[in-house]
Amino acid sequence: MTEAAPLDEMVDGAGGIRPHWGGLLGALSTLGRGELAGRAALLDRHFIEEGATSLLPGESDMPAWRCDPVPMLLAPAEFDALAEGLAQRASLLEAVLQDVYGPQQLLAEGLLPPALVYANPAFLRSCRAAAGRREGPLLHLYAADLLRAPDGGWRVLADRSAGPTGLAHVLENRRALARTVPELTRARQLRRHGPFFDIWQDALQRLAPPGAAGRNPGVAMLTGGPSSPHWYEHVILSRRLSCALVEGGDLTVRDGALFLKTLRGLQPVDVLLRRLDGRQMDPLEGDQSPSHGVAGLLDAMRAGSVRIVNDPGAGFAEAPALAAFLAGLAPRLLGERLRLADARTLWLGDLAVREQVLGDLGRWLVRRAVDGTVQSVTAGALPAAARAELAGRILAAPEEYVVSEALPASVAPCAGPQGLEPRPVILRLFLVHDGQRWQALQGGLARALAAPDPGTGARPGMRFSKDVWVPMQEPGEVQGPPQASIRALPIRRGSGDIPSRVADNFFWLGRYLERLETAARLLRASASRLAVSDPGPRALAELKSLAACLVRADLLDSETAREIGTVPVARVLLRAVRERGRLPGLLGQVGRLADLLRDRLTGEMHLALNRGMRELTEAFRAVPARREEAREEARSLDALGHVSVAVLAFAATVAGLAAENMVRGGGRLFLDLGRRVERAQAIAAELHRVLDQPGAAAQPARLEPGLRLALELRDSVITYRSRYLTALQPAPVLDLVLADEGNPRGLAFQLEAARDMLADLEGEAGGPLSQLAQSLLEEARAMVREVAEASSQAEAVLRLRPRLAALEGEVATLSNRIARRWFALLPAPHSLGPAPAIRMRGAA
Amino acid sequence: MIYRVRHTTRYAYGSTVDLAAHMLHLRPRDLPYQQVRSADLTSLPAAARRRDGLDHFGNAVTWLFIDAPHDLFEVTAEAEVAVRYPAPPAAAATPPWEAVREAARAGGPGAWEAVEYRFDSPMCPAVAAAGAYVGASFPPGRPVLAGLLDLNARIRADFRFRAGVTDLSTQVAEVLERREGVCQDFTHLMISGLRAIGLPARYTSGYIRTRPPPGQPRRRGADQSHAWVGAWLGADHGWVELDPTNGVVVQEEHVVLGWGRDYGDISPVRGVMLGGGDHGLTIGVDLEPVED
């Protein structure tokens, strides 16, 4: 190969600017060099805040997604030609898949070497209809990676057929650019992304098997869950496509049909958008790790009751060596010549080409024949010894290797510290089959490559992404390729039924938020009291009560609690807000659950939670860490007060957002339920402890510190004062804390709300759980009544303590019964038969 | 020869299974040399759903789905099968093993389906040590069947049949080291070695008659599922079945259930269940001639 210089996307050979870049360049120069770098930093921050993570295989070590403020421009006519070429290629791959998973005629005729099929880890034998044909399409969403060669022509580098990634990032790139560089986006009219996703959504509905006729087809996206490297994308995409995002454990197969386990029972799933490795779809037939997938899913697929796209076996078409045969297969399968060329590709299982290639290995890019996930190697970039070693490996197993022409990718302008700098770019374009034809997304993802790493010969990784812009030819141009086929979309409504797993997570999110808040309130009350330098007997009594509550909340050890008021304890309390302390621990739980629920939280809520948690984490970090710094009690107290106020503000923000942003029912209901249950339990527990004043029977005044604390911990001091104006008395205090349904910090409010929500969940007139909540409510009222009517209120109060302890236990019971009734407590599935430890190769 | 086979598999679970899915390779495969006269499959508890079909390799598969709680799962397969294996060709008449290797590499008409069986599979990767062991039977130019028969006899002589020292996860290399195991181990070893020298080999699952014909020694591997090796002789001669556990060419005493690349493709009973805890397994196989 002659060392051709890479083509420049923006500048033509003669030093002039290519016409379609003109307008953009003008806008860029108006912006100025420094400003551009500033916008790039802004974009970086945007993606960090969004929690956008890396996406593309082999690039998962990227900490956060990055997008260049300068887009990649493609002239409309050129884009349309690419889209047409890729549509043909997708049809060809579909035909190849149909043959490989059906009659295997291509193998019998010798048009496709059996080695590329039978040694391909993504050839899934359980997807083959040996005695017939598979019902299509096996390929539904397709993407290709391309580069522009020095001759100006585009070449396909790789096919993505298992489950192409990057679409969520395309959406987010465009959104982020519109916000951070409005000058550029406003400068011209672009073809929009919207129609593609509408077509996709519509196509998914149409894929529903005939059995779904007469009802709204159930469409779900199957993900590996938050631990999946592509979780971020799954969340964004499922939202854009209005389909349920589910994990294997959310699904079950009954009588050959697929269902989603929801709070309201089993809901049929007709179309499954697969975002899980095809080999993990069904533990009965594929990889035997029952933690993913659904037993019996492939049986349901073969029975035709559920359509899975892309087909579990579609990853087969990602084998790099396939490219060596596509040009030959196109006339046989489509009756056409291949329109869009590959980078010239040769399979080394072919004896004739092997010698030719090994004689001149330096000009080739070497890849594994059937495993596209293995990094390619530019043989020419290797030191001589390493190149010889590579040649040796190829000779030992030539069938396992494929080579393609090493072409320098074209360069496009990118923002850099010195203004615009050219970087090599690789393009990824996406197509979806609408049932009739392939429709291309009018845009795409460009990856700007880092400088090559000398020595390894590995192709350089991505430095950042670029949004791909296809300008409208003229304002008002009809969108994209002929789209006469777009019909009115049927009205759809997401079913409100949520999976049990999601309800479980919401419930615990509610509980942990409340627990965090309770802890902060206790710390704040402690900080203000400990600040008094020489507490009198009443203040001391309050501190003792408080200490008991602190111990219950795991904020203080019982030994130190006994010495409260006599030795400085602020330092000890401070441990609770330091790293690995109680509060950061609770916040960690909140963060974990918020991550698990990311797909269920509105964007605003997610952002606010994220930001709030970041700020709180910083507040925790700012706590004086070393003993020396915290030596002064006053400083410790100050820090304690400061942090607890920050936590309370965070809790209030989250509660407010939930109330204003979340649709009632479903997740919101369980979030609320968790809060109510947790708070009810805390109220009973605290009251039980603050009323522990042994001498009060004789001296009723001794109850006062406890009563005051009870009001303060329930944020009810002001209410009490406005109602009673004067001294504390047991019955009015208890009424406010236990029996007043109007006090959102009181027990009755929690129990009443829980009762109503449970009745709603149990349906009809309410079941045993709402009845349990009701009986607890009555018990709380009875307690207050008895105190109010007693001749000695103080004595009556003391008699309440065991009943309060029992009430605390009953609320815990209620919580357990809620968990058993609605949450997935099913044992994990396991398997019989062979379970060889197989390391999976390739993408399927 | 007509055989009647009865194969019972029984799982006793430590705790109740709420939901179970099973994939069974328990119905004998119809073949030119094996006619399945009847095949019946019953389970306890009865399946809520049963489907019969063919897998990629052309074997009969049955899927059972049980959604009633149960502590015991028992599946019984009964079949009546007439077998008449063709006599293997004269060893000297088969092509040199290198020619078979080349045909399996090139693929093409008559050969492309055999190509599948020369690649690594999860339980039968090409193991170099196994290749070295096998290679001793294949000096240059030797007719492929002569080499295979020699290898079949060597394994019988070199390895001790001993149950309980190996299990499903035992690797080929370990079997080679220990020089003992059961039919499955010898079959995997032979397949791995043949693949290592480039020859296609497949795993055949089936049965061997429980009581030998009068005057003959009792075979190893009776009373259980049995396994042996299918080896390819090239496009002209096709496949030959060799039982290294007994050192014989499969002819009169075996019944074929089906085949795959290794045990994993053709395991008689596979299942995924919710619940169950530990389980105890009892297997009973009876293969008796109906008439001689």
Image: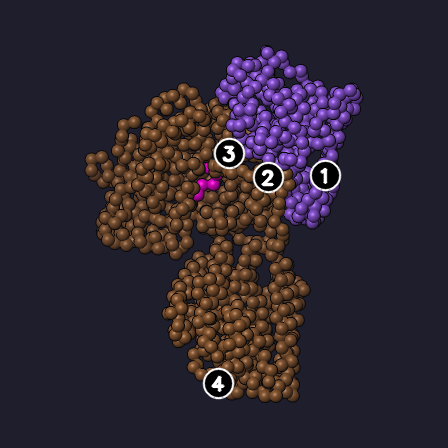
Chain colours: A brown, B purple
* Label 1 element class: strand
- As shown in the figure, which amino acid type bears the numbered disc 4? Gly
- Kindly identify which residue carries mark 3: A121
Q: Is there CB contact under 8 Å for labels 4 and 3?
A: no
Which of the 4 image quarters holds residue A346?
top left
Numbered disc in front, either 1 or 4? 4
- As shown in the figure, which amino acid type bears the numbered disc 3? Pro
- Kindly identify which residue carries mark 4: A536
Q: Which chain hosts label 4?
A: A
Q: Which residues are magenta?
A: A161-166
- As shown in the figure, which amino acid type bears the numbered disc 2? Ala
Looking at marks 4 and 2 on the same chain, the residue that comes earlier in the sequence is marked by: 4
- Kindly identify which residue carries mark 1: B282
Q: Position of residue B10 (x, y in %)?
A: 72, 40
Q: Is residue A566 above or below residue A312?
A: below
The residue lying toward the viewer, choosing from A133 and B197, is B197
Q: Which mark is residue A835?
A: 2
Residue A694: within the magenta? Answer: no
Numbered disc in front, either 4 or 3? 4
